[in-house]
C-alpha cells in the first residue's frame, strides 16, 4: 500500500513506524527537524504544509491508498484530508481532538451533504476513555479488550507478591475451562508459549499474564485473580474531555466518582452536567486535598490532566497512599516506559489507542487486526480458505511466533489446540509477532 | 405618575366597572338590591375613564413602574370591588375592604358573622372576585387585551409565582391564553362535578368559582360541611389541580402528555406532601375520633387539600380535632402548593430550592473544595434563583412574625394571632380558635383587620411589589418616569 501521513508528531511517527516494513510511507511535516528524527525509519519525509496542494501532489497523494491526517490541528487535518480526497487518494482518514467536530462529522446528515470526503474519523480521547473504563471497571485487571464481537476477551493480570501463582513453574499451572494463557509479560518482553524459555519459566511477582477467555471462562478466571471485589469509588484527576467521558460512564455503572479539576468554570460545567459526581475544585497534586477527600479509600485513581508531570506526581502519590489501581495518561509515547519504570501500573496514551484503530483499519486484505499486546505482538482474525479444509492446526506452516488462539465456527467459539481440524469459512483468531502479519496474510489468502 | 401607570389602572377599573354593571343587571333580574353594584360600577367606570384619559397606552414600562402598577391594581380594584358590600351588604368600610381584599387575593377569610346579611348576587360577586383573583388580574388583561401583551411582560412576571420564568409558548399572550383556558375549563368541569354530586346549581356555580382559584368563600355558612359527601370528594380533586401548576395541567390536558407532571420535581413533591399528610391525618382521625374509614379518609384528604392549596374550605370543624391533627394542618399550610397555580404561600418550589441549598452547605462542610450547583430535581439552576428565593423566604417569615406580633397585641390570643397571620399572608383563609373555619374574623380589632388587608395584599403579589413601595428608589424612578 501507498500511504501518505500528514504530521510527523507522535501519532504520525507511531503509524509510520508500524507501517514502514510492508508499505510505502510518505510523511509530511512543516518542521524540518522531523526529517532528521525519522531518518532511522524506512519512510520518505517531505517538509512543508499538508494543506499545500503542490506538496500533496509531490507526495503522490493521487495514487495513495490511504491519506492519514495526524497533525495537532483539527482544522488542518480536516482541510488536508478533504484536499487529499479531492486529489484522488482512495481513502482519507483524519484525527480529531474536539468533540464538537467529531459529532458534526459523524452525523449522517453531514455525510449526506459532504459525501464521503472523509472516510474515517479517529478520536484519540474517546479511544483512551474507552480503554481506561475497560481497565478500571475490572479490579486487578491491567488491560482488557473484547474481541470477535464480544465472544472472546483478552485480559491481562499481574502476579502479586502474595498471590498463589508467585514462584510457580508456569507449565505446572492449570487454567479453568475456556481460558488460554497467551503469554507472560516480563520487563517489557512478551514471552509466548512458542518461546524456548516458556517451558521452564517460573512466575515472579510483577509478571503480567495475558489470557484469552470465552464468555463462560471469564468469571471463573476473574475470580481467581480478583476474588469478588467490585470497584466502588474512583478518583479522577483532570476534568477535560477524557475525564468527563470517564466520569459519565462510571456514574452509569453506579460507581462513586470524585473528580478533581483546577478550572472553576469547567468544574461548574461538569457538576451541572453530571449530577452524582462529586466535583472538587483544586489542584490534583495537593496532598491535603486528596487526603481530605479520602483518596486512600478509593479503589482506583485515574490521572488524566493535560500535564504529564502532574499526572505522574498524582499517580505516585496515589500509589503511595495505597490506591490499588492507578491509571495514568501519558501524552508522549516515549515517556511511557519511563512511567512504567518509576512504578505507574497502567500508563495509557490517547495516541496509542487511536493508532491501534488506524492499524486495524489499514490491515492487509483478509486480516483483521483485533488488538495489540505491548507494541510487538498482535492479535488478528483471518478466515480459513477452502484449500485448508480438513487440515490440522498443528500442520499449518505458521511463522515461529504465530499461535492459533481460537476458532469461530457457526457463531460458536472454541479455544484451539493443535488437533483441531479446519473447515472452510472458519474464522481464526491468531496471535502473531508484528512482522509476521504479512506472512500470515499470505497463508490464509484466497477464498 | 407615569402615563402608562394611570392608563393601566384606568383600564383595570373600567373593566371592573363593566363587570359590576353586569351584576347590577343580575341583581335587578333576581329582584335584589342593585344599588351597591350601580354605585360601584359608576365609580369604576368614571375613575377608570378619567385615569385612561390622563394616561398613554403606548409605553415600555420600567421595572419600577411595572411593579408599581401591579401593587396599585391589586389595591385599587379590591377597594372599588368592596363598594357593594358597604351599600347592599351593610358592612363598615374596613369590613367591606377586608372582605373584598380577601376575595380578590383568594384568601377566603370572611368577616361575615351572619350569612343572612348577603343576598345571592352578593355571594356570587364575592365568588367571582376570587375567580378573577385566582388566575391573576394581569394574566386576564394580557389574555383579553392584545395591546397589553408587550408592556405586560414585566407585570406578568411580577404577578406570577414561578421561580424560573417559564413560558410554555414563545409569546406571552399565548401563555396567558393557555392558563386562562385551562382555568376556565377546570372551573366548568367543577360546576358540572358539583352539580352532578348533588349541589343545587347556584351553589355549584358559586363554589366552583372559589374552588379553582383556591379561594375558599362558600355561600354556605357551614362551608362544605353543609353539602353531601360526594361533593367533598369532587372538591378534593379540583382543589388539588388548583394547587398544581396550570401550565403543567395544560400540558396534561392539551398536550396529552401524562408524564409531564411527573417529570416536574415540584409536582412530585406536591403530590407526595398531599398524600403523606392525608394518610397520617387519616390515621389520627380514625384512632382518636369516631370517624369511620370513609369519613376519616374524606375529611383528611379534604382538609389537607384545602389548606395546602390555601383554599380554606372545611368539610368538618377541624378546630374540634385533636391538637396534633390541627398542628399538621397548620404545618402544611406553610408548605403550600405549586408555583404557577392558584395557591398562595411560600410555594413548594422555593422550599425545594432552600432545602437543596441547606443540603449543599452540609455537603460543602465535608468537601470544602467541592463545586456544587444548585439543583431543582436533576436540573441545575443559577445562583440568582437562590438569591431571590432566600430573600423571599426571609421576607415572608419576617412579615409573618411581625403580623403575629401586632395581632398578639390587639387580640391577646396566641393561637388566633399566629394562625391568622399565617392565613393572611399565605392567602389561606381560616385559622384556628375563634377564627377557625366555622368562625369569622368579625370580632377582630379594626387595626388587626388592616394588618390582615396588608398581609393578604402583599402575599398575593409575592411581597416584592408591595415592599418596593416602601423603598425610596421606587418613588424616585416613578418621578423620573413622568
Image (spheres, coloured by chain):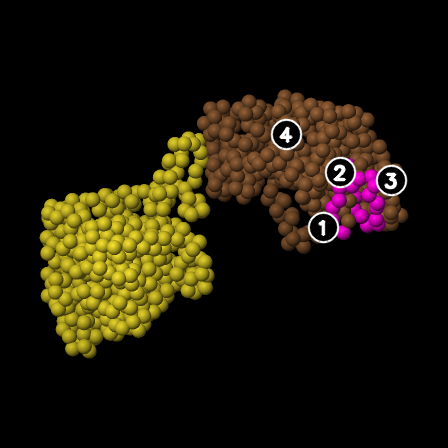
Residue in view at x 34 percent, y 69 percent: B189
Q: Residue furthest right?
A: A387
Sequence-wise, the earlier of marks 4 and 2 is 4
Q: Residues within 10 Å of mark 4 (few under 14, many from 20)?
A: many
Q: Please, which chain is the residue tagged with disc 1 on?
A: A
Do dots 4 and 2 share one subunit? yes
* Circle 2 crowding by C-alpha within 10 Å: few under 14, some 14–19, many from 20: many
| Measured Cα–Cα span from mark 4 to mark 2 | 20 Å
Mark 2 lies on a secondary structure that is strand
* Element assignment for label 1: loop
- Decide: is B96 above or below A137: below
Quadrant position of residue B402: top left
Which circle's residue, 4 or 3, is located before the other in the chain? 4
Chain with colour yellow in the figure: B
- Picture layout, residue B270 above or below residue B113: above
Vertically, is A231 above or below B141? above
Circle 3 sits on which residue?
A: A396
Mark found first going from the N terminus, 3 or 1: 1
User: Who's the residue at 67% across and 25% down the image?
Assistant: A166
Give the mark toward the camera: 4 or 3.
3
The chain carrying label 3 is A
Residue underneath mark 2? A379
Amino acid at each position: 500500500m501507498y500511504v501518505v501521513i500528514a504530521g510527523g508528531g507522535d501519532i504520525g511517527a507511531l503509524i509510520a513506524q508500524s507501517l514502514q516494513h510492508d508499505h510505502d510511507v510518505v510523511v509530511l511535516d512543516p518542521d524540518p527537524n522531523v526529517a532528521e528524527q525519522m531518518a532511522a525509519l524506512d519512510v520518505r519525509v517531505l517538509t512543508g504544509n499538508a494543506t499545500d496542494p503542490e506538496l500533496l501532489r509531490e507526495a503522490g497523494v493521487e495514487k495513495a491508498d490511504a491519506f492519514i491526517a495526524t497533525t495537532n490541528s483539527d482544522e488542518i487535518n480536516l482541510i488536508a484530508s478533504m484536499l487529499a480526497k479531492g486529489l484522488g487518494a482512495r481513502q482519507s482518514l483524519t484525527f480529531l481532538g474536539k468533540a464538537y467536530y467529531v459529532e458534526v462529522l459523524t452525523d449522517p446528515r453531514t455525510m449526506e451533504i459532504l459525501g464521503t470526503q472523509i472516510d474515517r474519523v479517529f478520536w484519540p480521547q474517546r479511544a483512551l476513555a474507552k480503554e481506561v473504563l475497560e481497565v478500571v471497571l475490572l479490579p486487578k485487571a491491567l488491560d482488557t479488550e473484547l474481541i470477535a464481537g464480544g465472544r472472546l476477551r483478552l485480559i491481562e493480570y499481574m502476579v502479586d507478591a502474595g498471590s498463589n501463582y508467585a514462584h510457580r513453574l508456569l507449565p505446572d499451572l492449570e487454567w479453568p475451562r475456556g481460558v488460554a494463557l497467551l503469554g507472560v509479560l516480563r520487563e517489557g518482553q512478551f514471552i509466548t508459549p512458542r518461546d524456548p524459555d516458556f517451558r521452564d519459566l517460573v512466575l515472579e511477582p510483577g509478571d503480567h499474564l495475558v489470557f484469552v477467555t470465552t464468555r463462560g471462562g471469564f468469571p471463573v478466571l476473574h475470580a481467581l485473580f480478583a476474588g469478588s471485589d467490585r470497584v466502588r469509588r474512583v478518583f479522577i484527576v483532570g476534568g477535560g474531555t477524557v475525564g468527563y467521558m470517564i466520569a459519565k460512564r462510571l456514574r452509569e455503572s453506579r460507581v462513586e466518582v470524585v473528580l478533581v479539576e483546577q478550572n472553576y468554570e469547567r468544574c461548574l460545567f461538569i457538576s451541572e452536567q453530571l449530577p452524582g459526581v462529586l466535583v472538587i475544585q483544586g489542584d490534583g497534586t495537593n496532598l491535603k486535598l486528596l487526603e481530605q477527600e479520602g483518596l486512600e479509600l478509593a479503589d482506583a485513581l485515574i490521572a488524566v490532566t493535560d500535564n504529564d508531570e502532574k499526572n505522574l506526581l498524582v499517580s505516585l502519590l496515589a500509589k503511595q497512599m495505597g490506591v490499588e489501581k492507578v491509571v495514568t495518561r501519558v501524552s508522549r509515547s516515549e515517556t511511557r516506559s519511563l512511567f512504567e519504570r518509576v512504578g505507574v501500573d497502567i500508563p495509557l496514551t490517547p495516541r496509542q489507542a487511536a493508532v491501534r484503530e488506524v492499524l486495524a483499519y489499514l490491515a492487509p486484505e483478509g486480516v483483521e487486526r483485533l488488538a495489540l499486546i505491548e507494541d510487538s505482538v498482535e492479535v488478528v482474525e483471518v478466515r480459513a480458505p477452502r484449500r485448508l479444509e480438513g487440515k490440522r492446526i498443528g500442520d499449518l506452516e505458521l511463522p515461529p511466533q504465530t499461535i492459533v488462539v481460537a476458532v469461530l465456527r457457526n457463531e460458536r467459539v472454541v479455544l484451539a489446540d493443535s488437533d483441531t481440524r479446519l473447515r472452510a469459512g472458519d474464522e481464526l483468531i491468531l496471535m502473531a509477532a508484528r512482522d509476521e502479519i504479512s506472512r500470515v496474510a499470505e497463508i490464509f489468502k484466497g477464498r | 405618575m407615569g402615563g402608562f401607570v394611570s392608563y393601566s389602572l384606568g383600564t383595570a377599573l373600567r373593566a371592573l366597572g363593566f363587570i359590576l354593571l353586569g351584576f347590577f343587571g343580575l341583581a335587578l333580574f333576581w329582584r335584589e338590591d342593585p344599588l351597591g353594584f350601580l354605585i360601584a360600577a359608576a365609580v369604576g367606570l368614571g375613575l377608570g375613564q378619567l385615569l385612561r384619559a390622563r394616561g398613554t397606552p403606548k409605553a415600555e414600562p420600567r421595572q419600577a413602574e411595572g411593579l408599581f402598577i401591579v401593587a396599585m391594581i391589586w389595591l385599587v380594584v379590591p377597594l372599588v370591588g368592596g363598594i357593594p358590600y358597604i351599600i347592599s351588604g351593610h358592612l363598615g368600610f374596613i369590613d367591606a375592604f377586608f372582605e373584598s381584599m380577601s376575595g380578590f387575593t383568594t384568601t377566603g377569610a370572611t368577616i361575615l358573622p351572619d350569612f343572612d346579611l348577603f343576598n345571592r348576587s352578593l355571594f356570587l360577586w364575592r365568588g367571582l372576585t376570587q375567580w378573577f383573583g385566582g388566575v391573576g388580574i394581569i394574566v386576564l388583561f394580557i389574555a383579553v387585551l392584545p395591546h397589553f401583551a408587550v408592556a405586560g411582560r414585566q407585570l406578568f412576571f411580577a404577578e406570577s409565582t414561578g421561580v424560573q420564568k417559564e413560558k410554555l409558548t414563545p409569546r406571552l399572550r399565548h401563555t396567558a391564553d393557555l392558563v386562562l383556558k385551562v382555568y376556565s375549563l377546570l372551573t366548568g368541569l367543577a360546576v358540572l362535578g358539583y352539580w352532578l354530586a348533588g349541589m343545587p346549581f347556584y351553589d355549584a356555580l358559586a363554589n366552583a368559582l372559589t374552588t379553582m382559584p383556591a379561594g375558599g368563600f362558600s355561600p354556605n355558612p357551614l362551608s362544605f360541611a353543609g353539602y353531601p359527601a360526594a361533593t367533598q370528594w369532587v372538591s378534593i380533586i379540583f382543589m388539588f389541580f388548583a394547587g398544581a401548576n396550570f401550565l403543567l395541567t395544560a400540558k396534561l390536558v392539551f398536550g396529552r402528555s401524562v408524564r409531564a407532571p411527573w417529570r416536574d420535581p415540584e409536582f412530585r413533591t406536591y403530590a407526595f406532601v398531599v398524600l403523606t399528610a392525608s394518610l397520617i391525618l387519616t390515621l389520627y382521625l380514625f384512632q382518636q375520633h369516631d370517624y369511620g374509614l370513609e369519613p376519616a379518609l374524606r375529611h383528611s384528604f379534604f382538609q389537607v387539600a384545602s389548606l395546602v392549596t390555601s383554599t380554606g374550605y372545611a368539610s368538618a370543624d377541624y378546630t374540634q380535632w385533636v391538637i396534633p391533627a390541627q398542628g399538621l394542618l397548620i404545618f402544611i399550610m406553610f408548605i403550600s402548593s405549586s408555583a404557577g397555580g392558584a395557591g398562595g404561600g411560600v410555594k413548594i418550589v422555593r422550599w425545594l430550592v432552600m432545602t437543596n441549598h441547606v443540603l449543599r452547605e452540609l455537603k460543602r462542610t465535608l468537601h470544602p473544595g467541592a463545586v456544587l450547583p444548585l439543583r431543582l430535581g436533576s436540573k441545575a439552576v443559577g445562583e440568582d434563583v437562590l438569591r431571590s428565593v432566600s430573600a423571599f423566604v426571609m421576607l415572608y417569615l419576617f412579615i409573618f412574625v411581625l403580623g403575629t406580633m401586632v395581632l398578639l397585641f390587639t387580640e391577646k390570643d396566641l393561637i388566633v394571632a399566629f394562625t391568622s397571620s399565617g392565613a393572611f399572608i399565605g392567602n389561606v383563609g381560616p385559622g384556628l380558635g375563634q377564627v377557625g373555619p366555622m368562625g369569622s374574623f368579625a370580632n377582630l380589632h379594626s387595626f388587626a383587620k388592616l394588618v390582615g388587608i396588608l398581609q393578604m395584599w402583599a402575599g398575593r403579589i409575592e411581597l416584592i411589589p408591595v415592599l418596593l413601595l416602601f423603598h425610596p428608589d421606587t418613588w424616585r424612578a416613578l418621578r423620573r418616569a413622568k
